[in-house]
Image (cartoon, rainbow, N blue to C red):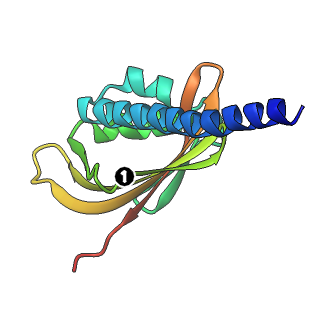
Amino acid sequence: MVKRFLFFAALAAIAAPAHAATMEDEVRAVFDKYIAIQNAHDLKSMRNLLADSPDLLWISRGRPIWGREAALKSLEERYKGTWRIDVDKKELRVISVSRRVAQVYAPTQLTVGEPGVEPARNRVYINLMMVKKPEGWQIVSILPIIVPPQ
């Protein structure tokens, strides 16, 4: 009986880190896809990454944008000009909140500008929350923090 318990305890200890690594890999892959979609200005693909919820929250230009449709409408306007996100992958972190919730912290450079205007470059800490749904990981909040110039 004790041997059987020790065997299953050892299996559980081995399986737990593997599951955590798998979750982190999944979340990183979705985040990488998010960045690629943003830089490609692909609204159709972005729709699939954002949770279809009125509680989806994106803080942008100091104001809250609630819901997937409002976020997509805002992105549609931004995509008309310069909109590029470059991630510092060495500093990117995935924080497991639970088995189905993860936070991504990503230091980035955001390059933005209206059409025909020289774009501004800002250092930003992106804090993004994802939830695992039956259709896969989806973004439920995007909370960027602008880093003041030094």
Residue at screen point 30% across, 75% down: 148
| Vertical relation: 122 (above or below) 29 | below
Q: How many marks?
A: 1
The secondary element bearing badge 1 is classed as loop
Question: Residue 93, position in %: x, y?
Answer: 42, 52
Can you say which quadrant of the picture contains the C terminus?
A: bottom left
Q: Report whether 2 appears left or right of 46.
A: right
Question: Residue 42, position in %: x, y?
Answer: 32, 25
Q: Report whether 14 appears left or right of 107.
A: right
Residue at screen point 61% across, 29% down: 52
Tag 1: amino acid = Leu
Question: Residue 141, position in %: x, y?
Answer: 55, 46
Residue at screen point 24% across, 62% down: 122
Residue at screen point 76% across, 31% down: 8
Judging depth in this view, the residue of 7 and 81 nearest the camera is 7
The residue wearing badge 1 is 92
